[in-house]
Image (tube, grey):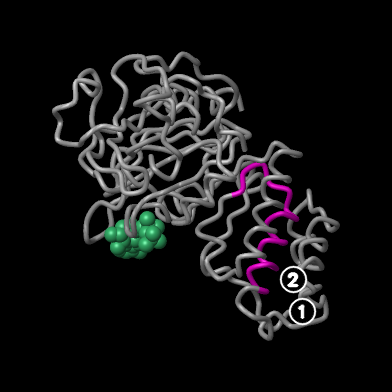
Amino acid sequence: MDHAKSQHGSGTGFARPPVGAAAIEAHGLGKRYRRGWALRDVSFRLPAGRVCGLVGPNGAGKSTLMGLATNMIRPTTGALRVFGAAPGSAEAVLRTAFLTQEKPLFRRFTVAETLRLGREFNPRWDQGVAEGIVRAGQVPLEARVGTLSGGQRTRVAFALAFGKRPDLLILDEPMADLDPLVRRELMATLTEEAAEHGTTVLVSSHMLAELEHICDYLLVIANGGLRLAGEVDELRAAHALFAVSGDGSSPALAPHRVIEPRNEGRPGVLARLGGPVAYGGQAEPPTLEELLLAYLRSPDAPPLIAPGAQVGDIHDIITRDRTKAVTA
Ligand SMILES: Nc1ncnc2c1ncn2[C@@H]1O[C@H](COP(=O)(O)OP(=O)(O)OP(=O)(O)O)[C@@H](O)[C@H]1O
């Protein structure tokens, strides 16, 4: 994916208005477990057709958000919609595939039987895609799932998810047990499928450098709150890495907000732009990894939700639901 498009940091300018349908819309979403809030007052919009990275430290609330989007978990506050429908509705279930870290499969079924089950449960089933993913890993169709290695089982779970031909594919750290070559192969499949079919993908991962290659949209959460949301290009263009000292004395930083005073990779200060900046010389656009690391290391930095990722208030959803109920 080409992230080198932005020539200038936009400073205050996020010009693009929200366009197109939303694959996911969350309004004031919150989830409280016994121990406390896992997610609190989260509002965002993920436009359809994007490959969105969901990033945050351990325990940030990523799996909780994915559970809410797939109706595995009910919200304590607020609401979430998938293509405008409640996550538990027949429409949302039909259009969504969810691949969890656990990848529950029937161990006594063969791979072929597992795919047959996928075909029977999913009206849009694409046997060619599912079998292609299995065969690319030389996983025998007649092998029982319980006899496969962890990585081979992950491949079968991927085949089930892609075979469903979902409009929204939600992947919760799906590649942790895959070797580097298989990771690359399945990530390539992911981006090709998404580009060809306009599938929206929400993928959580701690592999920041890998996300840079597949994502064009980003959600960052920490401590149950949304920290960053929007197009990768927009978010990068709203920041710069300044080759200056981090002690706050540099006049080059004056209109900007320092997010992280010391960047570990390229030396410099990562700042959110408070005015236009010409990249080159003292200021360079941060890579996605640099941007993410800066926000992960600076939990007190104020959130940045790009206009395209913003939603109206929760009453929009309630009004829409009432209208649907009346017209149904
Ligand atoms: N079923 C549950 N009961 C109680 N607390 C829970 C439950 N599930 C999650 N939590 C808590 O909610 C918070 C968010 O957890 P969650 O699994 O969503 O984080 P995560 O971002 O997916 O983390 P990781 O990167 O480690 O997978 C954590 O503090 C966790 O302990």
How far from the left and from the top, in percent, is residue 71?
Answer: 49, 51
Could you tell me which quadrant the N terminus lies in? top right
Give the residue furthest to the bottom.
147
- Give the percent coordinates (x, y) of residue 209: 49, 51
Predominant secondary structure, magenta span = helix
Q: Are marks 2 and 1 in contact (CB under 8 Å)?
A: yes
| Residue at the image point whose x is 48% and y is 56% from the top | 207
Tell whether 244 sits left or right of 2. Answer: left
* The CB of the residue at mark 1 lies under 8 Å from ligand 1: no
Amino acid identity at mark 2? Thr
Q: How many C-alpha atoms fall within 10 Å of the one at disc 2: few (<14), some, or many (≥20)?
A: many
Residue 2 is left or right of residue 192, and the answer is: left
* Vertical arrangement, residue 107 with respect to residue 163, above or below: below
Say what secondary structure mark 1 lies in: loop
Where does the C terminus fall, quadrant-wise? top right
Q: What residue did someone put label 1 on?
A: 110
Q: Quick one: SS at disc 2?
A: helix
Q: State the extent of the magenta-drawn residues as a range.
A: 152-169
- Exactly how many numbered labels are in the figure? 2
Instruction: Pick whichever, 116 or 239, lies toward us.
Output: 239
Q: Quadrant of residue 290?
A: top left
Residue at the far front: name it.
281
Q: Residues within 10 Å of mark 1 (few under 14, many from 20)?
A: some
Residue appearing at x 23%, y 24% in the figure = 253
Q: Is residue 319 magenta?
A: no
Q: Which residue is mark 2?
A: 114
Q: Which of the numbered marks, if any, corresponds to residue 66?
A: none
